[in-house]
Image (cartoon, rainbow, N blue to C red):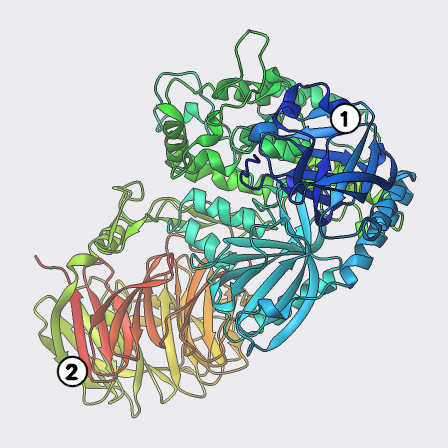
Amino acid sequence: MDLEGKNRFSLLLLEPGEIYFEDFAVIYHVPEELSKKEEGWVRWVENTVRGRLKVCSKSLVFDPRDIHVPIIKFPLKSIEVVQEHVTTITKEILNSVEEATLLEVKCNMTVEMLEGGILQPYKFCREEYCHRFELVFLETSQVIPQICQLQRASTLPPNDQNTMIQAIVRSRQRRKRFDRALLENLSETEVLETQANKVTPLVTNPGTILLTNAKLYFQPHNNAEKHPVIKIGITEISQVIRRRYLLRQVGLELYCRDSCMVKHLLLTFKETDERDKLYDALVGLKGLKLDDSLQDNISYQWQAGAISNYDYLCYLNRQADRSVNDLTQYPVFPWVLADYVSETLDLTDPGIYRDLSKPVGALNEERLKRLKDRCKDMPEPRFLYGSHYSTPGFVLYYLVREYPQYMLCLQNGRFDHPDRMFNSLADTWDNVTTNPSDFKELIPEFYNDEGTGDFLCNFQGINFGMRQNGKAVGDVELPPWADGPRGVLKKMREALESDYVSNHLHLWIDLIFGCKQNGKAAENADNLFYYLCYEGAVDLAAITDLNERLAHEVQITEFGQVPKQLFKHTHPKRSRSYGLYDSAHLTSRTDSCESSEGKEEIESDKEGNFEVLAPIAESRNFWQRLAELKQLRSCRVHREGINAVAFSADSGNILTAGQDALLKIFTLPEFNQIRSLRIGSLAAASCLHIPGTDTVLVGSWDNVVYRYSLQYSHVDPFVEAHNDAVSCMEWHDNVLVTGSWDCTVKVWELEGGQDGMLRRKEKESVSKYGKAGHLNPLCIGNSIVCEMDHDSMVTCVALHPAGSYLAVGTHDGVLVIWVLPRGTVLHQVNCHTRSINAVAWNVDEEHRILTAGDDGLLIIVDALLGTKICVHDLKETARSVVWDGRLVFAGGVSGDLILFDMGTGSVVQRFTAHRGPVTCVTISQNYEYLATGGEDRQLIVWGFSA
């Protein structure tokens, strides 16, 4: 009686790249000579075995029902004759004898696989037999021509063989159409139908893709897949990424949400245009809602501490065309620990970690010297390392226990020599740091602390052979500090997330994904590999000789591939000033960002580079106490809306400027009004107190900057600054910046008098912008560089904390970054589709600027590069912001004070504040108070309970 087990056939039983076309129900007549041996599997059968005969591009495969009988592969190149054989057979049901025509295959070698359902090395039988198959539902004449055509191809020289097989494949695929009966809903609108290959480790399986307005379907051209058709709802797709495959841009990978029948699907196409047509059609569908996966956003989130090192490395691998579906481009992770022999590990000890600034091949200076000496004697193109840090063989070296079928496929039915297998973590580390040809990195499985660690255990009990020391290859020998396989994963994950690795991981990212991965920078960093490892080294599409092209593909696969370069500049370091914020308690999980050194000192060298010496302790304390923040005072202080709120330099007073042209001053914490006076004839737009003086400056819509003396209670027009309303002002170190609706920004140099009154600084040179009796703009020698023109109204300005740069937001949504005091444009960035309402520098990472616009977006810009590094949608317009480098207080048009986390891209908390838009938000210099003003004429002071 046949034992019908699970379907054992898999495309992994074929040669890599081999195509499975179709199969037929057959009865296998066991050769009489084989039956007489009565050994092995033949003792379980009589004379015939039922099963299916599969026709493939390089072999015939018999897949029996009986689990005791092995799957038998007949390589086409070993087949001598394919013909009809007429014989008489006995029908079991009617017990009658009939004449039948069988398919006869004369073969001098067969490969037996999975005998008894046991995964083990394949058995190669090099004896000549005539194997006969009785087709159950078809005539033999219908099958023989197809098999003979493929068998003839196998007798040709390799180049001609490959050409003929590809022609057969194309001819068969042209006849394939998607079966419309498989549609989920017949009312779906068809968008695109095309051909593609579904890629899984070591397997490419052709099929037909149909894209409708509701789903994407993949129907394989054979029955080897788990699903006869893969159905992916458009709403189930979370990411669509164009991929590189064999150094060609012909791949497309879909990541799906949990409700989908597959987690991800990697497809490859014949040409880039075919891939791009499907990509464009897919992303153009209305129902598609992709996750926010902008590279800049994710990089910022990692730098801000919002995502873990593990998650960031997984993301970088995905963006760099690394996929678990493609062993030639499997995700690569670094060796982090360098100690695999100690009983315990102290993760705070830098001595236990690998140097992440160097590639694996450069960790051993003596070995590196020998490699460099060899490299000098090479002809061009030279390379340091003959083997890569990630190849299919290296990946399976680690995963052979969990996926032994991959290794059998890759190595033609054999496992590696027992002594060369992954037997010990300590020995492997020793080998990659001493062996002259072993430079492999790790894979993500070593750091997935939610995994089972099965790849470290021979849980299937497979016979991998005996080592020279007499031990069978079993479980991987673990370090003494590990408590079992899961303990290894847990400890290595803790090491990956440690402070040491967090502070140095960007150096390894530069080597693998960044500016030191290729070219002269790679050579200088001792990170140079064989030229075929790099994208662009060879244009496979331009190679017309199919045999040469396939040879290059094999070389590319064996040598490994450098990931797609993601970063052209040095990758920023994970910021020490950010922690993993707990949104529930609004506190930091790390104390490393705190300092007792007092205020931060910021310096700018002559090249414009920044040096951050210490974080601001007061700032950190404020942002960590946000759970205690509440309204301390609230009062309607103006007859019309409030345009500006500012604290005095000593945080003892609070100033407000309103549309009613009034300036008002209140004491803190008593909140007593001590001044109320009219400033000019039109609305007061901005106000600020000059440190070290008794002077308050107020910008007005009547084009004038007014000066008010707190000591003498006197107000006078200080300077007629612009030809239109003064919309904003900033002050730093005796430098005043004013912005206006006349599209200009002016920089003024001021000085204080002995009586504390702010005075105009007299200049020998005459400013072409100054007027008699007015403050002269800032002059450098005899060259005046004080006025900066823009294409639209200036809405907001922000001075760099060191006074070196000026950020200007305009009505047309453009951010302009100026270099001071030269007054030259550093960058002009199109940030928003509408007006920029607020700009702010980060005092900890001072080359970053936050902008808030009428379009509801919050955007972080790298001032030195002029690029957006983070974009989030607040879902409402913010008129003003306060920013600590990660958390943002935004005044929204809803009237709420919104605490937004730029790291996670989410609203942490909403504080009910005003009845109508919040127009201004500011924080006191001592980080004790926060103040908001609104169109409802209310001033609210926020702080902490005593």
Q: Residue furthest bottom?
A: 681
Residue 830's tag is none
Does residue 925 sit above or below 81 in this rendering?
below
The x, y position of residue 421, in whole percent, is: 58, 21
The answer to whether residue 389 of the structure is visible from this angle is: no
- Can residue 844 be seen from the camera position used here? yes
- The residue identified by callout 1 is 32
Snapshot quadrant of residue 447: top left
Residue 637: assigned label: 2
Residue 827 in percent (x, y) is at 56, 65
Which quarter of the picture shows residue 904?
bottom left
The percent coordinates of residue 868 (x first, y second) are 51, 63
Q: At 41% across and 82% down in the image, what residue appears?
A: 721
- Residue 57 found in image quarter: top right
* Callout 1 touching callout 2 (CB < 8 Å): no
Q: Compare residues 291 and 620 and report the one nearer the observer.
A: 291
Camera-side residue: 526 or 940? 526
Residue shown at the point (49%, 38%) measured from the top left:
444
Question: Outermost residue, top direction?
Answer: 469
Assign a secondary structure to mark 1.
helix
Assign a secondary structure to mark 2. Answer: loop
Q: Position of residue 55 (x, y in %)?
A: 75, 45
State left or right for residue 816 relative to residue 480.
Answer: right
Q: Looking at the picture, does residue 726 appear above or below residue 818?
A: below
Q: What residue lies at 62% left-to-right and 41% top-to-bottom?
A: 10
Q: Classify the position of the N terminus by image quarter.
A: top right
